[in-house]
Amino acid sequence: MTVTRRATESGQRHGRLADLLRNVSYEVMPFKSTERAVLETVPRTIPLTVTVTAARGMAATLDLAERLLQHGYQVAPHLAARQFVDRHQVADVVARLRESGVRSVFVIGGDVPEPAGEFPDAYALLRAMQEIGHPFEDVGIAGYPEGHAAIPRHAVDLALRQKAPMATHIITQICFDATTTSSWAAGILAAGIDLPVRVGMPGPVNRQKLIRIAAGLGLGQSARFLQKQQSTLWRFLLPGGYRPTKLARQLGVAAAKGGNTIHGLHIFTFNELRGTESWRRELLSSVAGRDHPE
């Protein structure tokens, strides 16, 4: 391989990673300190999703989403199907979000053991929202490059095909193998699902916070995912087990190969917002060759 070709390919990889870091969104948890932390550290150009906690239900999620929207952020509350009781509640939540000016949502099944009502999964909730005539311009759905711990692979694949026509983008769950993620993204594109994909990955996370999460003190969709995926959890807790920069660079390489619709990154922040945004800016500066990435 010639020096020129190597330089060209290196530039393409760096350029692709820079694109992913610019097209980024952050997941936050609706705790008391979240609003202040977002205002202090997160640029308003970065879209946010607000997760649902099992303990607080949807109320805390919707309240925080509305407050952040008033501060000028683009915010997508998580709507967990299994926490909705009936279609009247769906209509009420949709009406509330319409009145508040929310234009983005992230629709998930939710991990509560038993549905509260008639919506066992995200597909059922999406259909109800569509029948109501929801106002949302952006509707995110979940993707699972490595499958789902509690759902057979064929059922996960079928659900994605069913949900895709009612969505505008996909956010993936955590996967530490960039090749697996890019292969999955190429596979769904080949199957006719051409929605843009935001790859879900953790940012720099404090190990002590993850220990509290593992003990059940931290709540939220991504936290519950870690509780179920013990091998994933240990990759965080062991020294040197997880480095976000390494995974981000690998994703930049994988995305640059083409044949997929990987569009950006979705960072599971676990509310480590200051460290996450500092990490993103430093990495973007290094690959974009600029001192001030924003």
Image (cartoon, rainbow, N blue to C red):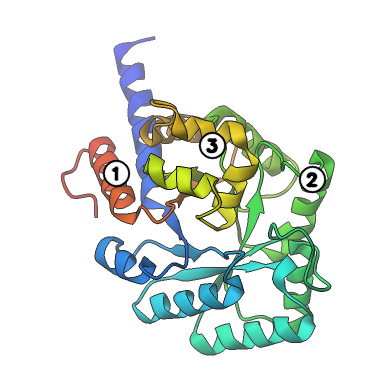
Hey, which quadrant is residue 119 in on the image? Answer: bottom right
Mark 3 residue element: helix
**Image point (42%, 36%), residue name:** 248
Q: Which residue is mark 3?
A: 233
Tell me if I can see residue 18 in this picture: yes
Q: Which residue is mark 2?
A: 151
Q: Amino acid at mark 3?
A: Leu
Mark 1 residue element: helix
**Image point (73%, 63%), residue name:** 122
**Image point (78%, 82%), residue name:** 87
Q: Position of residue 264 (x, y in %)?
A: 47, 48
Q: Amino acid at mark 1?
A: Trp
Residues at marks 1 and 2, CA–CA distance in whole angstroms: 34 Å
N-term-proximal mark, 2 vs 3? 2
- The image shows a total of numbered marks equal to 3
- In this picture, is 125 found above or below 254? below
Q: Name, please, the residue furthest toward the left.
A: 291
N-term-proximal mark, 1 vs 2? 2
Mark 2 residue element: loop
* Contact, mark 3 vs mark 1 (Cβ under 8 Å): no
Residues at marks 3 and 1, CA–CA distance in whole angstroms: 21 Å
- In this picture, is 40 found above or below 270? below
Classed neighbour count for the residue bearing mark 3: other residues with Cα under 10 Å, few (<14), some (14–19), many (≥20):
many
